[in-house]
Image (tube, rainbow, N blue to C red):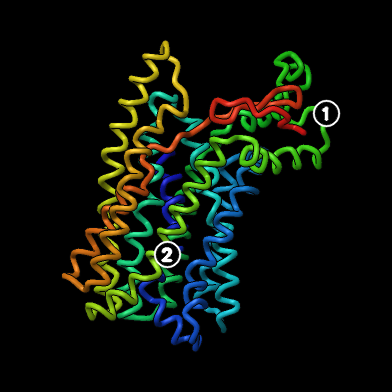
């Protein structure tokens, strides 16, 4: 189950970065003179990628996680084909934007699926497997994308991504099962006789609310958690800044290694492996270190773990981010040997891989008379 979810999660970051080495060809294809518009062709994906989870995650609590994953992947297949056959830059950016929204489904829902399947003390390794896709895809995608662009055309980058979406659907639709308990309970209740249903007293999340009220309740939840929980807000702000810096660095790779070192699109794609190496090392160390620290702190707290007990490795990793950025920027400006900026990007990748990001698993059902917990904090006034 985790492997299938991880496969789904691997594709959107692959789609976001695989075209990076082909940015000069995209500019030539659509006759773009402005560097900002060229960068927008890459980064427009991220705008909707950030907005998507605010809608898709609440919908998964209403209709189940599995079909949000399936539909998101199928829509991504269609939007990637739209990018491949776009007649102009406006339609290309529009399809990239829509692709980011649909591609946000595994990012928004996948962590919840893993949380449904594993207990808190056993979750770190599964989460490492799940997050391996988002971490490795932005590094491995440009390697394949560079050679595809050089040997064929940047159009086939999106055709390959669409084909990968098709393979994921062929595997995921027949094999992936629903994991969210309230949805499973509702499905079970529908199959039962009314008398047995009353005897089990299965409580539906909607209660006496209308569908519109229940939809508003779920869609407002991420905004409330973001604005009412200081921990959620600070972690989101931190990750948005780091992720933005990450893609800003991405946009400089193709031009830097082409102008300073004479790399073509194919060989230029290999320079992204420095980031991938940093991600792999962080994932390996993070899975073991995070679990050990969490168990040790939980034992000191009477055996009860808290989400913030996974923060120490995150703090440790954050020190590598400025080191990697300085290393990359200095070596690129000085035009030293090409391995130096790649090493800097690897150090940066080790720092941003957030190998210990706290995960909070909500209660199965929260009625308007309950307070909602967010990272072990009571968010008072949650339902306004």
Task: Give the residue at mark 2.
Answer: 248
Q: Name the residue beneath numbered marker 1.
A: 208
Is residue 185 or residue 340 the one in the foreground?
340
Residue appearing at x 52%, y 41% in the figure: 234
Reply above or below: 145 against 309.
below
**Dot 1 or dot 2, earlier in sequence:** 1
Residue 164 in percent (x, y) is at: 42, 61
Q: Residues within 10 Å of mark 1 (few under 14, many from 20)?
A: few
Q: Is residue 326 left or right of residue 90?
A: left
Q: Please provide percent x and percent y for residue 10.
A: 41, 53
Label 2: few (<14), some or many (≥20) within 10 Å?
few
The relative height of residue 213 versus residue 237 in the rendered view (above or below) is: above
Determine which quarter of the picture holds residue 326: bottom left
The part of the image, by quadrant, that contains residue 227 is: top right
x and y percent of residue 85 in the render? 53, 79
Residue at the image position 40 percent from the left and 43 percent from the top: 130
């Amino acid at each position: 189950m985790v492997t299938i979810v991880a496969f789904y999660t691997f594709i959107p970051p692959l789609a976001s970065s695989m075209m990076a080495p082909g940015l000069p060809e995209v500019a030539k294809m659509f006759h773009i003179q402005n560097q900002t518009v060229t960068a927008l062709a890459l980064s427009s994906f991220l705008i909707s990628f950030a907005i998507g989870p605010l809608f898709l995650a609440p919908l998964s609590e209403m209709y189940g996680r599995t079909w949000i994953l399936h539909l998101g992947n199928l829509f991504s297949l269609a939007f990637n084909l739209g990018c491949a056959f776009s007649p102009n830059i406006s339609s290309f950016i529009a399809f990239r934007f829509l692709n980011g929204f649909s591609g946000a489904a595994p990012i928004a829902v996948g962590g919840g699926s893993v949380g449904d399947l594993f207990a808190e003390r056993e979750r770190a390794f599964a989460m490492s497997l799940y997050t391996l896709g988002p971490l490795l895809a932005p590094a491995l995608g440009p390697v394949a994308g560079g050679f595809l662009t050089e040997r064929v055309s940047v159009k086939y980058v999106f055709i390959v991504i669409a084909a990968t979406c098709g393979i994921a659907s062929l595997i995921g639709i027949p094999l992936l099962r629903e994991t969210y308990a309230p949805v499973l309970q509702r499905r079970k209740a529908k199959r039962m006789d009314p008398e047995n249903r009353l005897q089990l007293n299965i409580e539906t999340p909607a209660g006496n609310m209308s569908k519109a009220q229940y939809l508003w309740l779920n869609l407002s939840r991420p905004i409330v958690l973001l604005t009412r929980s200081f921990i959620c807000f600070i972690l989101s702000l931190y990750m948005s800044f780091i992720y933005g810096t990450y893609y800003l660095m991405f946009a400089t790779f193709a031009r830097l290694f082409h102008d300073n070192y004479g790399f073509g699109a194919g060989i230029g794609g290999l320079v992204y492996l420095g980031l991938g190496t940093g991600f792999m090392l962080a994932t390996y160390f993070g899975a073991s270190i995070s679990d050990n620290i969490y168990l040790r702190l939980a034992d000191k707290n009477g055996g009860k773990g808290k989400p913030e007990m996974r923060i120490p490795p995150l703090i440790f990793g954050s020190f590598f981010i400025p080191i990697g950025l300085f290393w990359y920027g200095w070596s690129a400006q000085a035009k030293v040997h090409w391995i130096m900026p790649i090493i800097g990007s690897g150090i940066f990748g080790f720092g941003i891989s957030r190998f210990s990001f706290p995960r909070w698993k909500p209660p199965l059902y929260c009625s308007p008379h309950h307070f909602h917990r967010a990272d072990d904090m009571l968010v008072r006034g949650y339902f306004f």
